[in-house]
Amino acid sequence: MSAAASPERSSLSIRAAIPPNNLTELGRDAMRALVADLGQPAYRADQLFRWVFQKGARDLDAMTNVPKTLRAQLREAGYGVGRVTVGRVAESIDSTRKLSIKLQDGGVVETVLIPMEEGQFTQCLSSQLGCALDCKFCYTGTLGLSRHLTAGEIVDQVIVARAALPPGARVTHLVYMGMGEPLHNFDGVVDSLGPICDPDGLGYSLRKVTVSTSGLVPQIERLGKTAPVNLALSLNASNDAVRDAIMPVNKRYPLASLMKALREYPLPPRRKLTIEYVLLGGVNDADAHARELAVLLRGLPVRINLIPWNPFSGTGFERPADEQVRAFQQILKDRDYTVTVRTTKGLDIDAACGQLGERPDA
Ligand code: SAH
Ligand code: SF4
């Protein structure tokens, strides 16, 4: 069995070679345990938590209401603050910003700020350095997996990106749709949701957060039980034969098991599942595929997001003609689905879906 088909196994050997002690890695409970170990009262942990995640402090000395003795104890124990730094920032003509995110072991991932309404951005977060799932149409997939990101490396993407926003702008929504398969890095992603959704941390409600997956069925079930955020599924095919050919993960978790997991997923109230469907010319974009998709999704609370394939070289795939995209959309609309075509943002800076990952010439 290939590595792509058995992601759980590959996760065992992946360890980050980064300094172990960092406050940005600690959830509320871990922060309390640390402070208790140091013989300090519990409310000091809550102060630290707010400094790290709400105020985005990058240095122990910035934490002015934390006693010097505690700061000295933390320093002595080797605790740093902040896991990542921003490298290059590329700005697209449509105002999309792509940030290179430098990890402490020299790795680089990317996060993208996508303009929505006036002054509001959606941030696309990376969860792994590369990806093991090997989807044939995805640039990140060609890189293979180097390692999972830690919870702190995921949360810190949100903290450091604040400085790259235009004045007065805010990130209102978070989507785990950058590099990597979030549910392959299940623990890292769930641990990152702690500070992200804590009112004393970054304060995002679960409704404002979406995790996108290629379809790891057991982890979809676990996510629903642990942190029921919005779910997006990268479906990309209307039958097993096509999905097997473009997404190796489908051989392990075929459509029947995936549809069952989606039906049982506990969405936040009044929310719909997002079904992402990358349109690949001549592969999955025929009228017959649209009709088959309509039948496959019948009865599920979904909105469908069609993504005309964003090209990169050496794949043999083609972006479908606009006319075919519209025809595909119309067939689904005629069957009462809500269907949007994802406007391609950031294409000129390789920040569009499936284009993330350092280029050799970057
Ligand atoms: N691994 C997760 C999240 C990251 S991929 C997942 O697969 O869901 C984010 C989205 O980009 C997925 O829906 C994927 O199907 C899509 N995608 C990948 N490569 C693409 C490309 N070249 N053009 C357009 N969309 C692509
Ligand atoms: Fe990984 Fe998602 Fe790309 Fe597939 S589409 S290779 S799961 S990042």
Image (cartoon, rainbow, N blue to C red):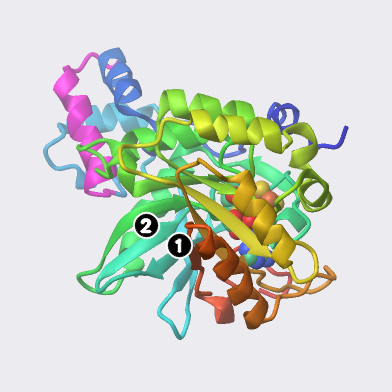
Left/right of residue 306 with respect to residue 195 in the rendered view: right
The crowding category of the residue bearing disc 2, from other C-alpha atoms within 10 Å (few below 14, some 14 to 19, many at least 20), is some
For the C terminus, the quadrant is bottom right
How far across and how far down the image is residue 210, in percent? 43, 47
Q: Residues within 10 Å of mark 1 (few under 14, many from 20)?
A: some
Q: Amino acid at mark 1?
A: Val
Look at mark 1 in the image and give the residue it sits on: 86
Q: Residue at x 56, y 70 (%)?
A: 330
- Quarter of the view holding residue 308: bottom right
Residue, far left: 65
Give the labeled residue for mark 2: 160
Please say if the residues under marks 1 and 2 sit with CB atoms less than 8 Å apart.
yes
Q: Position of residue 290 (x, y in %)?
A: 66, 60
Q: Position of residue 87 (x, y in %)?
A: 49, 66
Above or below, 75 against 168 in this view is above
Considering only vertical position in the picture, is 328 above or below 3?
A: below
Magenta-drawn segment: 38-57
* x then y, percent, for residue 139: 71, 62
Residue 48 in magenta stretch:
yes
Q: Could one spot residue 358 in this view of the protein?
A: no
Write the residue at 75% across / 47% down. Answer: 239
- Identify which residue is drawn at 43% across, 31% down: 191
Indicate whether residue 49 is drawn in magenta: yes
Q: Is residue 241 visible?
A: yes
Q: Residue at x 32, y 69 (%)?
A: 165
Secondary structure mostly seen in the magenta stretch: helix
Amino acid beneath label 2:
Val
Q: Nearer the viewer, residue 163 or 344?
A: 344
Q: Residue furthest bottom?
A: 93
Q: Secondary structure at mark 1?
A: strand
Viewer-side residue, 307 vs 285 = 285
In space, the residues marked 1 and 2 are separated at their CA atoms by 7 Å
